[in-house]
């Protein structure tokens, strides 16, 4: 009789399979601390990839899932198998170009997790915030179907929500990124609405959290919606990749998308994806002085930046070319632009912009018959004034190589490219491509209908961005502007410079304001406008009113013209979101202070102890005693001060205070 024999192999195989399955699904947990150990990231990589954010022992973000979903069905961030986890600590100073300070501290701890599937995630913890980004080392092309970005706040905090508004032909992903801020609890976020970054959240006890992004090269921007299952969280929404485009939108100036793909981006690897940022502040002064976008954006790709000249711009459009006391008809014509050039030359203003109407129809290559562009350029050169030309994105992008070549040879210094009104992958690709080509021809750029996201560091010839409900809106809108003005420095401006276009010489109280196209006015006082040139960051800063008005108000115009547009040092002296702000900036040995308030009058004490030793000549502009009735009322005085002095400041409703301190 044959003995029965039994093999243990099948049993052992099952055991091993169970063991291996458990081993691969058991999550790995990592902790990353900021250099000062106050901020802690908990990262879990297993069936899902999630992160938790803790600040000074308080949970800011509950576990929040993140992933990249590929068109082939692969989910980078699901069933994660970690291959390696490498740590790095950095503490260095970054040289800043055309910024609000000459250097930025870059001090962080980093954890880079590489996973099976040729992808990974980099996490960074700073003393004032955190950031993460995906990377891929896959060979060849990849298609990103979607990105899962969640930010699950622990409780129902108050937040400032910039909903998407003013849609082009109803497309939620085509707008000018101009939004007012709804101050509401997160739970009141409208479920049917999209919002744009940044998002500001009040954590209580003066602490704030701000969501931002940077380094959007060849990748769409992130919008967000309420994350209904979590009640208090938001999750990222991304515009799909455009398949069909046409001219349309506002006055046929937009490049509209008629059909979108079922994915958000197609790209090549290896590559890194945009940074997702949470900035954390202990008070509103810190909030208004964060450098996260500047730190995390890709470094400059221009070796020699000496030709990039920031400065002021005499602007024609806002004031409707409405100069007076001249013997010619004002408008889009050669005599009018010579008048603007004369003003710029007399007041030390670096540029004049020729806005909409200087070229024929949609043909950027052919100047209008109303002007002699060569004569204007020759005259400007003789007066040491640069000329910048306006163009819509669609009109310009289709002839960009010819336009840069032709107009740089003629002496044009740069272009104001308008009506992007999109940040899908194709639009962002164009932003970077135009910047690179402009740098080749040594030309500067100002992007309108586009919000900044780090491009200004990578290509510092892009000196400004709009993406703000600025002065142009005051021509026709009755929005409550001064509170918006003192919210911008804590939100929109923290992502990069903004072309708000200040400088109105016709100023109105809340009761007296009315919209006007040809004789536009501002809401708030004259000195509220002057203070914007210190408070608002704009390396290329407009002077929105017309030269006739500035010549009549020479004291104010010369103060504006003499205020730099880039600085060596910045400090926030006092601040409260949507209430008021006091900013000081240094250029060389001279210091500048700007203070602005909402519609509430207020008294502030400005302590000059930040000044170095020595005496300073202070040229001070204050709201006049009657500025609450006549918003143009102001007082100019000169004082000798030192760092031992304190100045009592009284701000009228919608008021301001501005000063220049010249080292003696």
Image: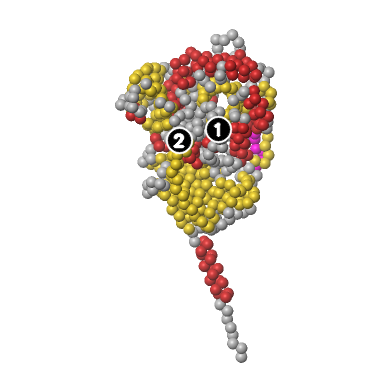
Is residue 303 visible to us here?
Answer: yes
Give x and y (percent) for residue 36: 38, 46
Callout 2 secondary element: strand
Q: Which mark is residue 141?
A: none
Residue 552 sits inside the magenta stretch: no
Q: Is residue 60 above or below residue 624?
A: below
Quadrant location of the C terminus? top left
Which residue occupies 40% across, 26% down? Answer: 589
Q: Which mark is residue 304?
A: 1
| 595 lies left or right of 325 | left
Hey, which quadrant is residue 325 in on the image?
top right
Please name whichever residue, 416 or 212, is drawn nearer the observer in this view of the structure. Answer: 416
Hey, which quadrant is residue 431 in on the image?
top right
Question: From which residue to which does the magenta span run?
Answer: 254-260
Give x and y (percent) for residue 540: 52, 27
Q: Residues within 10 Å of mark 1 (few under 14, many from 20)?
A: few
Which residue occupies 66% across, 38% down? Answer: 258
Quadrant location of the N terminus? bottom right
Q: Indicate which label's residue lies in the foreground, 2 or 1.
A: 1
User: Mark 2 = which residue?
Assistant: 103
């Amino acid at each position: 009789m044959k003995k029965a024999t039994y093999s243990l192999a099948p049993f052992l195989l099952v055991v091993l399979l169970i063991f291996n399955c458990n081993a691969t699904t058991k999550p790995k947990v990592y902790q990353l601390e900021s250099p000062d150990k106050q901020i802690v990231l908990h990262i879990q990589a297993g069936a899902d990839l999630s992160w938790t954010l803790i600040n000074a022992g308080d949970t800011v973000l509950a576990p929040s899932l993140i992933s990249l979903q590929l068109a082939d069905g692969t989910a980078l961030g699901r069933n994660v198998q970690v291959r390696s986890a490498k740590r790095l600590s950095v503490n260095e100073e970054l040289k800043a170009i055309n910024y609000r300070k000459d250097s930025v501290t870059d001090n962080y701890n980093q954890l880079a997790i590489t996973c099976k599937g040729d992808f990974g995630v980099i996490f960074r913890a700073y003393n004032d915030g955190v950031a993460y980004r995906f990377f891929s080392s896959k060979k060849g092309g990849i298609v990103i179907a979607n990105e899962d970005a969640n930010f699950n706040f622990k409780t129902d905090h108050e937040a400032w929500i910039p909903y998407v508004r003013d849609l082009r032909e109803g497309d939620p992903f085509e707008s000018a990124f101009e939004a007012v801020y709804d101050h509401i609890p997160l739970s009141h976020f409208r479920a049917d609405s999209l919002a744009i970054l940044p998002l500001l959240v009040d954590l209580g006890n003066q602490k704030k959290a701000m969501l931002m992004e940077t380094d959007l090269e060849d990748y769409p921007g992130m919008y967000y919606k309420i994350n209904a299952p979590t009640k208090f969280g938001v999750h990222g929404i991304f515009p799909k990749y455009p398949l069909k485009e046409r001219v349309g939108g506002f006055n046929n100036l937009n490049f509209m998308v008629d059909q979108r793909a079922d994915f958000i981006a197609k790209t090549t690897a290896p590559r890194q994806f945009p940074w997702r940022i949470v900035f954390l502040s202990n008070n509103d002064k810190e909030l208004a002085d964060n450098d996260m976008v500047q730190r995390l954006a890709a470094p400059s790709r221009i070796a020699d930046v000496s030709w990039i000249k920031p400065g002021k711009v005499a602007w024609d459009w806002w004031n409707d070319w409405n100069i007076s006391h001249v013997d010619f008809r004002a408008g889009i014509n050669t005599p009018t632009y010579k008048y603007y050039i004369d003003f710029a030359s007399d007041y030390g203003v670096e540029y004049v912009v020729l806005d909409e109407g200087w070229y024929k129809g949609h043909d950027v290559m052919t100047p209008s018959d109303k002007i002699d562009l060569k004569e204007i350029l020759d005259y400007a050169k003789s007066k040491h004034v640069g000329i910048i030309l306006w163009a819509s994105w669609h009109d310009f992008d289709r002839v960009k190589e010819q336009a840069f070549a032709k107009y740089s040879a003629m002496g044009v210094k740069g272009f104001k490219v308008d009506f992007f009104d999109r940040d899908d992958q194709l639009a962002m690709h164009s932003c970077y491509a135009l910047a690179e080509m402009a740098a080749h021809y040594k030309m500067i750029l100002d992007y309108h209908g586009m919000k900044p996201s780090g491009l200004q560091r990578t290509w510092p010839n892009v000196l400004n961005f709009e993406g703000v409900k600025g002065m142009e809106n005051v021509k026709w809108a009755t929005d409550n502007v001064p509170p918006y003005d003192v919210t911008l420095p804590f939100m929109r401006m923290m992502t990069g410079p903004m072309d708000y276009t200040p400088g109105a010489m016709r100023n109105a109280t809340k009761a007296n304001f009315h919209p006007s196209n040809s004789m536009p006015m501002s809401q708030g006082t004259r000195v509220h406008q002057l203070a914007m040139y210190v408070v608002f960051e704009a390396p290329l800063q407009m002077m929105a009113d017309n030269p006739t008005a500035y010549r009549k108000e020479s004291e104010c115009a010369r103060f504006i013209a003499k205020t730099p547009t880039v600085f060596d040092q910045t400090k926030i002296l006092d601040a409260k979101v949507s209430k008021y702000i006091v900013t000081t900036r240094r250029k060389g040995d001279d210091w500048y202070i700007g203070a602005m308030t909402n519609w509430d009058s207020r008294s502030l004490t400005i302590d000059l102890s930040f000044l170095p030793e020595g005496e300073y000549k202070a040229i001070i502009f204050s709201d006049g005693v009657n500025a609450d009735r006549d918003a143009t009322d102001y007082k100019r005085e000169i004082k000798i001060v030192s760092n031992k002095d304190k100045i009592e400041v009284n701000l009228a409703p919608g008021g301001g205070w501005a000063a220049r301190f010249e080292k003696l």
